[in-house]
Image: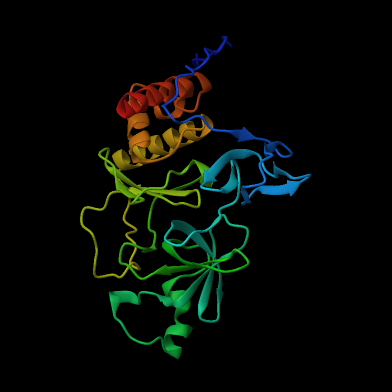
Amino acid sequence: MAAIEVRLPVARKLAGQSQARGSDKHLVAPGDTITTDTGYMRGHGTYMGDEKLIASVAGAVERVNKLICVKALKTRYNGEVGDIVVGRITEVQQKRWKVETNARLDSVLLLSSMNLPGGELRRRSAEDELAMRDYLQEGDLISAEVQAVFSDGAVSLHTRSLKYGKLGQGVLVQVSPSLVKRQKTHFHDLPCGASVILGNNGFIWIYPTPEQKDEEAGGFVTNLEPVPLHDREVISRLRNCILALVAQKLMLYDTSIVYCYEASLPHQIKDILKPEVMQEIVLETRQRLLELEG
C-alpha cells in the first residue's frame, strides 16, 4: 500500500520583530506624503504636488543629502555602470546582440565589446561579423558587465574580461532585483561545492564549481560533460534555498545563501519549499545573520 503524506494546517508563529540596528525603513505607498519641506530635491519615484513631495511608487524612502528618492520593492532592473548581470541572447543583429536582462528594454552587446575566442586582440572584421552565431546564438546565457546606460534607460554590456562570457551547464533562478545585495564581487565559489553568479538584474546562475579555470577559451568553450549526481543535488538544494529566502524577503548574498544551505541540511531537498520548513530554515538563517552583525 502506497504511503500517503498528510499535512494539517497549524497556526503560524510570528517571526521575531528583532531587526538589526539602523535598519528601520521609511516605507511609503503611492500617494503618501514624504515631506512638506520644500528644501528637498525630487528623485526617482517621487513627484511634487501642492508644495509636498509625494511618492509615486511603493517602496523605501532613501535620502542622500537633500535628494529624496523611493526605491521600489518590486521593479524591473534599472542598470548602473559596473553592475554584473546574467542575460539571455534574444536576437542577433548587425555587429550586435540583443540581450534580455530583466530590464524595461533589451540590453545591447556589441561585437567590439567582447573578447574573441582565444582572447586575441585585433580589429573585428567582416569574417567575425559573419561568424557571430558561432560565438553566441539565440537562447545562450551570458554573464557580462554594464558598460554604459543610454538616455532611454537601455543598457550597453561588455564581456572583455575572461571571467565573463557564455555560461555552460547550470540552473537559472529569476528573483526581484531589489533582493540582490550589492557587493564588491558577485562571483562566489561556495564551500558546498557549487558556485553562484548573483546578477544585479535578479538573474542568479548556479553551476558546478569548475576544477580548473579555463583561461584559454576566452569564455566560449562550454563543458557539456554529464554533471555528477552529488553536484546536481547540491545545485537543486541551493536553488530551493534561494527561493525560500526570496519568499521570506531576505536579501541574497553569499553569507545568507550559505547559512540557509546549512540550515536546510536536515531536510530533504523536495521538502525545503513546504511553507513550514521554509519558515523554519529562513528564521534560523535570519538569527545567524543578526548574531553575525552583533
Coloured how? Answer: rainbow
Q: Position of residue 77 (x, y in %)?
A: 56, 53
Q: Is there any visible trace of residue 175 in the rendered image? A: no
Q: With 152 as the anchor, is 80 left or right in this view?
A: left
Residue 239 lies left or right of residue 184; in this view the side is: right
- Residue 167 lies in what quarter of the image? bottom left
Q: Nearer the viewer, residue 113 or 148?
A: 148
Residue at left 30%, top 28%?
292
The residue located at (40%, 25%) in the rendering is 286
**Rendered position, 119 above or below 3:** below
Residue 228, quarter of the rendered image: top left
Residue 281 in view here: yes
Single out the residue that lies furthest toward the left: 212
Position of 162 compared to 128: left or right?
left
The residue sitting at 21% across, 53% down in the picture is: 211
Relative to 127, residue 210 above or below: above
x then y, percent, for residue 33: 70, 37
Spot occupied by residue 164 in the image (x, y as percentages of width and height) = 36, 63
Residue 22: % across, % down = 44, 30
- Which of the pair 25/179 is nearer the observer? 25
Say which quadrant the C terminus sits in: top left
Count of labels in the image: 0
Taking 183 as reference, is 285 above or below it?
Answer: above
